[in-house]
Image (cartoon, rainbow, N blue to C red):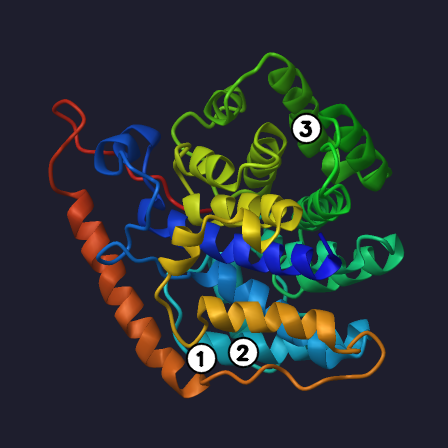
């Protein structure tokens, strides 16, 4: 596989994982098992899938890279403006920290001062494409991950989690076609990557537990339960990242199994599935993503074909030294698309209130942090 396969696999793997996980977001594992016994297809609307903010943030990051010319300051400014226009389109289901940061951006704060203190998993949506493109240049990877993270989240934990995701994507892509890296090696590399950062202690402890769980043959759900996440993986980045990394190391060459396993954990299913899908996708490439899952996405103007073209632009243009034009997008259609998406989300919320119930109890709602 070439570098272009890894970039395409990363972006498409993230997008398809996101679309698969949207219908189950906020649900408990037991409720998901009742309502969605079959995860081999999309369930958002008549057997089709639709992207959420996870894919949109990944694509905005890629677009900002194209126009950056490899300059982090230009990248940050471009991403800031894209977030402003994205927020103006009234997207549904975004986290509180991202809302507050976007409000600050719209009020005139520069992207270097728009972030709020939060350890939500927003930055982890934007870091996979950075990992697959900058993983061989660690100083630049750190620089771009920091800029991408702090534009919305200033808690060092958010940056640490995003950096681990970027590194996992890089290592998955670097070992494509060969044996996957050992869990112990990945954890050792992450420990070195985050050395000197006190905020990383809890994340590293969860990654240490990952090695023992994999050696014992535990499933992704069993590992999540060991972290205290038996009722769902929350939107806290130190919950999201270890579970997504575990799914990759548990199923390094099986995209379907990796994504399904994190959705079965419940909670913030779209984001965790998007991250796991990005990491495994970077290793297996576009051809490793089941064709029916790619064909089952029915979104516009950010379609599967559009995401594929965006990946091609990242590979075919000299954006690292010369600013390029962003890939055209029908932005006028986005508010209408978001309105239709929100109506479908309300339909899913209503469906969750209906049978079958778990015994005599209605399912508990797991809020996204």
The Cα atoms of the two marked residues, 1 and 3, are separated by 38 Å
Furthest residue in direction top, as rendered: 216
Residue 348, visible in the rendered structure: yes
The picture quadrant where one finds residue 76 is bottom right
* Residue 349 image offset from top left, x and y in percent: 22, 51
The secondary element bearing badge 3 is classed as helix
Q: Residue at x 39, y 52 (%)?
A: 292
> Which residue in the protein does label 1 denote?
88
Foreground residue among 303 and 71: 303
Please identify, in this view, whether the residue under mark 1 or under mark 3 is nearer the observer. Answer: 3
* Residue 338 image offset from top left, x and y in percent: 34, 72
Q: Pointer 2 and pointer 1: residues touching (CB < 8 Å)?
A: yes
* Residue 216 image offset from top left, x and y in percent: 60, 12
The Cα atoms of the two marked residues, 2 and 3, are separated by 35 Å
Foreground residue among 149 and 18: 18
> Which residue in the protein does label 3 denote?
207
The picture quadrant where one finds residue 8 is bottom right
Residue 101, visible in the rendered structure: no
Q: First in sequence, mark 2 or 3: give its number.
A: 2
> Which residue in the protein does label 2 denote?
84
Q: Left of 268 or right of it: where is 122? A: right
Q: Residue at x 62, y 19 (%)?
A: 214
């Amino acid at each position: 596989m070439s570098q272009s396969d890894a970039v395409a696999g990363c972006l498409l793997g993230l997008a398809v994982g996101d679309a698969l996980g949207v219908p189950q977001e906020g649900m408990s594992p037991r409720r998901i098992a009742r309502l969605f016994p079959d995860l081999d297809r999309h369930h958002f609307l008549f057997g089709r899938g639709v992207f959420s903010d996870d894919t949109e943030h990944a694509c905005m990051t890629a677009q900002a890279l194209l126009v950056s010319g490899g300059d982090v300051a230009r990248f940050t400014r471009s991403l800031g403006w894209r977030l402003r226009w994205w927020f103006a389109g009234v997207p549904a289901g975004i986290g509180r920290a991202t809302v507050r940061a976007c409000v600050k951006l719209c009020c005139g704060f520069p992207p270097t001062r728009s972030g709020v203190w939060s350890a939500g998993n927003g930055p982890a949506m934007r870091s996979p494409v950075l990992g697959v493109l900058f993983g061989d240049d660690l100083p630049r990877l750190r620089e771009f991950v920091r800029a991408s993270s702090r534009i919305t989240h200033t808690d060092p934990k958010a940056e640490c989690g995003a950096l681990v995701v970027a590194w996992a994507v890089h290592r998955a892509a670097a070992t494509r076609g060969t044996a996957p890296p050992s869990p112990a090696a990945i954890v050792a590399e992450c420990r070195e990557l985050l050395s000197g950062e006190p905020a990383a202690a809890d994340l590293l402890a969860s990654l240490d537990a990952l090695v023992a769980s994999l050696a014992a043959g535990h499933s992704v759900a069993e590992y999540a339960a060991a972290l205290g996440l038996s009722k769902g993986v929350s939107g806290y980045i130190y919950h999201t990242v270890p579970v997504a990394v575990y799914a990759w190391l548990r199923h390094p060459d099986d995209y379907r199994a990796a994504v399904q396993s994190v959705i079965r954990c419940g909670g913030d299913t779209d984001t965790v599935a998007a991250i796991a899908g990005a990491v495994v996708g970077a290793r297996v490439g576009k051809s490793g993503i089941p064709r029916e899952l790619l064909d089952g996405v029915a979104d516009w103007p950010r379609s599967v074909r559009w995401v594929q073209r965006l990946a091609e632009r990242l590979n075919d243009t000299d954006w690292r030294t010369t600013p390029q034009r962003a890939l055209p997008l029908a932005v006028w259609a986005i508010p209408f698309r978001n309105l239709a998406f929100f109506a479908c989300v309300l339909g899913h919320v209503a469906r969750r209130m209906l049978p079958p119930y778990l015994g005599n109890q209605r399912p508990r709602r797991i809020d996204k942090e």
